[in-house]
Image: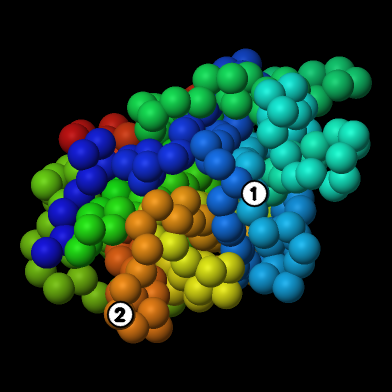
């Protein structure tokens, strides 16, 4: 039996908090996931134009076996500074990897960015980009409840021709909880052609993104849909996501979870993993619940659930977004 978590947010996974901060003049923002304790993590990169910080440290062969935080940020390469703000905040709390007695602890913070520099906001911020400060503010605001849509890294996001946003969803299965968090800024469209139904509609639970269904079987008349982004440029997009579970997975198992979860992109967006996107999925475990029985079978089931949950989170991010400037929301376009 599969059901939504209590809040239908990634924070239904015990031991996680989410913080968001925005600059609405610039039209950008930062989303931070903070683990109460260092958590095992892995990453899978599918897009052709990723922008990341400290992703190599998540390789299962690396020395550091847990992260303190993960960061999703707008701002393209400028947004990589957001992780430094989160790291400074966590260091002040005494968090981090102990290199040796007497030396400062080093918080392990990995991050990924999306491109939101062409959304009409005021990008003349002077000599100091705002992202380090936004990262710290987001960390300070981290809690169990958070808004979706035009918040955090989703503020400046655009998905196809629709206003993109921050999305989240959760699911429970056989005592385990799994959650997804995503900032949707894709080249591809989240909506089925000639329809107001999301590609992710078969996975929707309890009308969480409007309950719209295609009237008949939808046939694509072209390989590329008309409501994808009209001016596609390398590095100008990217959907970045986190899936998390309380199942006690190893880092190698988390790598497989991230790989399987990436199929959620393909279930919710068309086209996907293009040369112009930097699509990326982090997978994280708080290890609150031990696995029993066959580990490969458990990982297989959790990976399948992660893909479905991520597809729901993508649709929710677009559904919850509000029109911003010249970018119209799904709800405004379809008078929802």
Q: Residue furthest left?
A: 215
- Residue ID at (90%, 36%): 103
- Residue ID at (56%, 51%): 39
**Can you tell which of label 2 and label 1 is closer to the viewer?**
2
Q: Secondary structure at mark 2?
A: loop
Residue 291 visible in the current orientation: yes
Is tag 2's residue or tag 1's residue first in the polypeptide sequence?
Answer: 1
Instruction: Pinpoint residue 293: horizontal percent, then vertical percent.
Output: 30, 80
- What number is the disc on residue 235? none
- Residue ID at (45%, 39%): 16
Q: Residues within 10 Å of mark 2 (few under 14, many from 20)?
A: few
Instruction: Pinpoint residue 18: horizontal percent, then vertical percent.
Output: 48, 33
Instruction: Pinpoint residue 300: horizontal percent, then vertical percent.
Output: 36, 79
User: Which of these two is toward me, 24 or 173?
Assistant: 173
Quarter of the image with the N terminus is: bottom left
Residue 186 visible in the current orientation: no
Q: Secondary structure at mark 1?
A: strand
Q: In the picture shown, does residue 68 fall above or below 253? A: above
Q: In the picture shown, does residue 27 fall above or below 296? A: above
Q: Is residue 98 left or right of residue 25?
A: right
Disc 2 to disc 1, C-alpha distance: 27 Å
Q: Which residue is mark 2?
A: 293
Q: Which residue is mark 1?
A: 67
Q: Residues within 10 Å of mark 1 (few under 14, many from 20)?
A: many
Hey, which quadrant is residue 71 in on the image? top right
């Amino acid at each position: 039996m599969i059901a939504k978590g209590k809040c239908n947010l990634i924070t239904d996974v015990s031991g996680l908090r989410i913080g968001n901060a925005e600059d609405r003049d610039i039209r950008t923002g930062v989303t931070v996931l903070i683990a109460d304790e260092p958590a095992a993590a892995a990453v899978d990169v599918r897009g052709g134009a990723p922008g990341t910080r400290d992703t190599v440290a998540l390789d299962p062969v690396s020395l550091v076996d847990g992260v303190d935080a993960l960061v999703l940020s707008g701002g393209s390469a400028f947004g990589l500074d957001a992780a430094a703000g989160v790291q400074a905040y966590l260091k002040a709390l005494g968090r981090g990897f102990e290199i040796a007695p007497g030396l400062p602890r080093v918080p392990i913070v990995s991050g990924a960015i999306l491109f939101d520099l062409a959304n009409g906001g005021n990008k003349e911020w002077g000599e100091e980009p705002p992202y380090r400060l936004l990262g710290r503010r987001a960390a300070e605001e981290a809690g169990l409840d958070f808004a979706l849509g035009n918040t955090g890294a989703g503020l400046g996001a655009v998905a196809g021709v629709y206003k993109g946003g921050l999305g989240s969803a959760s699911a429970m299965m056989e005592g385990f909880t799994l959650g997804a968090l995503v900032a949707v800024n894709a080249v591809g469209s989240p909506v089925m052609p000639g329809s107001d139904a999301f590609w992710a509609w078969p996975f929707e639970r309890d009308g969480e993104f409007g309950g719209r269904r295609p009237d008949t079987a939808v046939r694509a008349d072209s390989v590329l849909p008309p409501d994808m982004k009209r001016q596609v440029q390398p590095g100008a997009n990217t959907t970045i996501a986190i899936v998390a579970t309380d199942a006690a997975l190893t880092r190698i198992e988390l790598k497989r979870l991230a790989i399987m979860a990436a199929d959620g992109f393909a279930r919710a967006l068309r086209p996907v993993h293009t040369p112009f996107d930097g699509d990326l999925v982090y997978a994280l475990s708080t290890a609150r619940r031990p696995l029993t029985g066959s580990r490969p079978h458990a990982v297989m089931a959790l990976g399948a659930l992660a893909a479905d949950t991520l597809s729901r989170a993508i649709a929710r991010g677009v559904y919850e977004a509000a029109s911003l400037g010249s970018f119209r929301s799904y709800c405004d376009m379809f008078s929802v």
